[in-house]
Amino acid sequence: MKTGPSSIERILEAIDENQTFCIIGHQRPDGDCIGSQLGLTIALRNEGKEVSCWNKDPVPQKLKFLDGKKVVQRPKENEAFDCVICVDSANPDQLGRTAEFVRERKMLINIDHHSSNTRYGDINWISSRSPSTGEMIYRLMREGGWHITPRIADCLFTAMSTDTGSFQNSNTQPETFTAAGDLLEKGADVSRISDEVYQSYPLSRVRLLKHVYNHFRLIEDNQIGYFWLKLGDFTRTGSDPTEVEGLIDHIRNIDDVVLACMFEELEPNVTRISLRSKSKQINVAEVAKQLGGGGHQALAGARMTGKPMTVQRKVIAALRKALKAADKKN
């Protein structure tokens, strides 16, 4: 029985047939998003394609070392592309206003590793087993026979490292280490990446972390930990929302904590929810789905509207329900 071409084969065929591209990713980009966007953009340019790289939000401070040439730009109006490639974005809403500026296109390719992806592209390559979109981009380049330069290797290694918690999360696969090793051979500067991403923080983020330690709460016999970041907290600490990445892990890492939650005020009555789970029996992606979001088993999130305390009650109730369901299984 013959089978049709794989998603990778269809994507490589589409890339070969088109000339102008725009690589887009989700708002509030993290290491996987920026690393995937930049790595793919640079690779396509090296293949002779005309490529723009857009994101609604700027590159976070700790990731700017990847984009010294300022490849990632804000969206521009009235531009048309043969092909738009969206990376690391489970649904179009995550793109913010970028989605409005890429409507003039012949084709949309959707490359993502979130199981909650809504398959909104003309070509969809969704690999929920992959721990990062960066690893998927690496596979695409290998299949296409593209040259991986040291600069591309830096981008993809950063993407893979950040979305696996420095290769410590349960989603890390054997092939992840194989890919990471190959990127090191191709010139990825792991020492610089580690220093920039994990060991260099502005004082403002340390002030923000101090706020977290002073205000987090533990409930359910210390099994659920949560904290709030309000708009005023950023003002008081001199920080900005790009510095919240990783703060939740400080609460998750408390010995008794099974579920961690961060409530971040985006604007009055709009809250960003971040969830983490240390239990294989609690899938926070399912919890997030109930709240209008999505993600992975151990890492998920959502955006909710409503008064802060109303949002908090809904989220905590959902976490308590998940915790009790897991306890009954034991």
Image: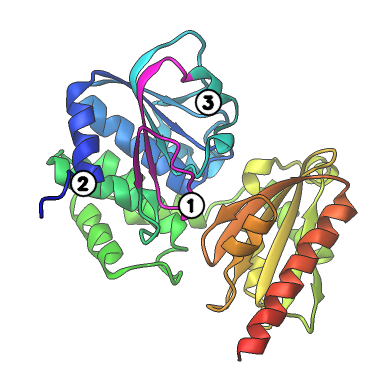
Mark 1 vs 2, N-terminal side: 2
Mark 1 vs 3, N-terminal side: 3
Mark 3 vs 2, N-terminal side: 2
Looking at the picture, how far across and down is residue 244, in whole percent?
65, 50
- Kindly identify the amino acid type of the residue bearing the numbered disc 2: Ser
Q: Is residue 99 above or below residue 251?
A: above
* Element assignment for label 3: helix
Q: CA distance from mark 1 to mark 2?
A: 34 Å
Which residue occupies the extreme front position in the image? 1
User: What is the quadrant of the C terminus in the image?
Assistant: bottom right
Which residue is painted at 53% across and 66% down in the image? 297
Which residue in the protein does label 3 denote?
Answer: 99
- Kindly identify the amino acid type of the residue bearing the numbered disc 3: Ala
Nearer the camera: disc 1 or disc 3:
3
Q: Residues within 10 Å of mark 3 (few under 14, many from 20)?
A: some
User: What's drawn in magenta, residue-wise?
Assistant: 102-125
Which residue occupies the extreme top position in the image? 78
